[in-house]
Image: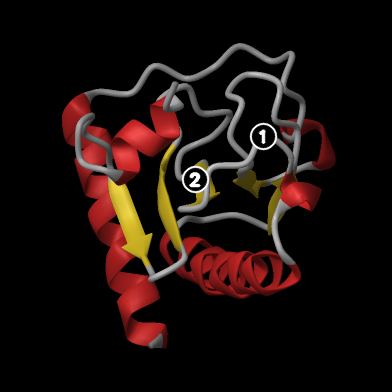
Amino acid sequence: MASIFTKIIQGDIPCYKVAESEEAIAFLDIRPLSKGHTLVVPKTEVDKLFDLSEEDFQALWSFAHKVAKGIEAAIPCNRVGVAVLGFEVPHAHIHLVPLRTEGDLNFALPKLQLTAECMEELAASIAHEVAELV
């Protein structure tokens, strides 16, 4: 059965997309730790990140680098944190989280509830910055 991320990639489920390449897609997490929390997902559906082929793995991280730079330019933060967990969805993905402090990258923290309008504005702002890098 296709994961929720595969359904997003196929366009069956909407998302707040910030960037897309041939190999991957980046969209806002709908349960973010901070404004701009973005998921970077390979289009190849594998459960674990290290199950990707070497080529897909390298392409994913190269794409994540561009997205992180876009986040950093669009969102006031001190750093963009990176986490790979993969327990919530059985499809490899990278969390890029704008951070002000080290404690901001704690998945036990309450998640933000942002309006659709706020999510659209965040996605557009990050997308603009990522597009400037290409």
| Residue at left offset 74%, top offset 39% | 48
Front-lying residue, 60 or 76: 60
Tell me: 132 left or right of 2.
left
User: Disc 1 and disc 2: Cα gap in Å?
Assistant: 18 Å
Q: Quadrant of residue 84?
A: top right
Q: Position of residue 104 (x, y in %)?
A: 72, 33
The colour scheme used here is secondary structure
- The circle on residue 22 is none
Tell me the kind of residue under disc 1: Asp
> Percent x, y for residue 57?
69, 64
Q: In the image, residue 13 lies at what x, y percent?
A: 23, 29
Examine the image and state in which quarter residue 62 appears: bottom right
Residue to which mark 2 is pinned: 38
- Three-letter code for the amino acid on which mark 2 is drawn: Thr
- Where is 127 relative to 115, above or below? below
Foreground residue among 49 and 17: 49
Q: Which mark is residue 47?
A: 1
Q: Is residue 119 left or right of residue 93?
A: left
Identify the residue at image location x=69%, y=46%.
100
User: Residue at (49%, 61%) from the top-left corner?
Assistant: 71
* Dot 1 alpha-carbon crowd within 10 angstroms: few under 14, some 14 to 19, many 20 or more: some
Image position, residue 129 (x, y; %): 36, 73
Q: Secondary structure at mark 1?
A: loop
Mark 1 or mark 2: whose residue is earlier in sequence: 2
